[in-house]
Image (spheres, helix red, strand yellow):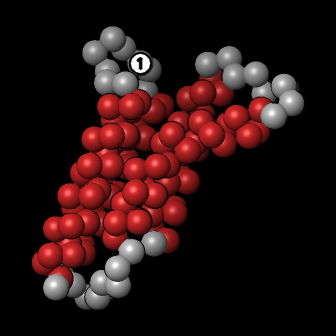
Amino acid sequence: MWLHVFLATAAGLCYVYKGVQSNFAYWIIGASVNMMFHALTAMWPYVISWLFFRSPINLRALALWPYIILLIGSTAAVMHLYVAPTTQDSPGVGVVTVAQALLYVIGASWVIVRSA
């Protein structure tokens, strides 16, 4: 669970960083709430993964480690996508977060099946 929290926070901060650079009106009242909602855009795949994966799993299960590597590797790739300059060929944030959530759910179900 703590890995989900840490990675969601890191991805959310990278996504907000991208928004701050694109003329974010931080001086307006309520801008911090708006910024938190922007961060939630990047955090929801981790929330879905945590909700799907919250059943107790033995930490010694060998199937857990590929899932942890999947979480960390995909988070690094997504964070790179968030801070990299956008081009016309780069996928949108919605496509990336939906693909990320599907990948996490498939990975979590694989771990649950393998550790049972």
Left/right placement of residue 112 relative to residue 4 reads left
Left/right placement of residue 99 relative to residue 7 reads left
- In the rendered image, residue 104, in percent from the top left (x then y), is placed at 29, 56
Q: Quadrant of residue 16?
A: top right
| Quadrant containing the N terminus in the rendered view | bottom left
**Other residues around mark 1 within 10 Å, as few (<14) / some (14–19) / many (≥20):** few
Q: Residue furthest left?
A: 114
Q: Residue furthest top?
A: 88
Query: Is residue 28 placed above or below 88 in the rendered structure?
Result: below
Query: Is residue 49 placed above or below 26 in the rendered structure?
Result: below
Q: Residue at x 29, y 88 (%)?
A: 58
Left/right placement of residue 62 relative to residue 57 reads left
Q: Residue at x 17, y 82 (%)?
A: 115
- Front one among 98 and 9: 98
- In the rendered image, residue 72, in percent from the top left (x then y), is placed at 35, 57
Q: Identify the amino acid type marked 1.
A: Thr
- In the rendered image, residue 66, in percent from the top left (x then y), is placed at 20, 67
Query: Is residue 10 placed above or below 110 in the rendered structure?
Result: above
Disc 1 secondary structure class: loop
- In the rendered image, residue 85, in percent from the top left (x then y), is placed at 44, 20
For the image, the number of numbered tags is 1
Q: Quadrant of residue 88?
A: top left
Q: Quadrant of residue 18?
A: top right
Q: Residue at x 68, y 36 (%)?
A: 35
Query: Which residue is tagged 1?
Result: 86
| Quadrant containing the C terminus in the rendered view | bottom left
Residue 2 in sight from this viewpoint? yes
Q: Residue at x 24, y 73 (%)?
A: 65
Residue 11 in sight from this viewpoint? no
Query: Is residue 79 placed above or below 67 in the rendered structure?
Result: above
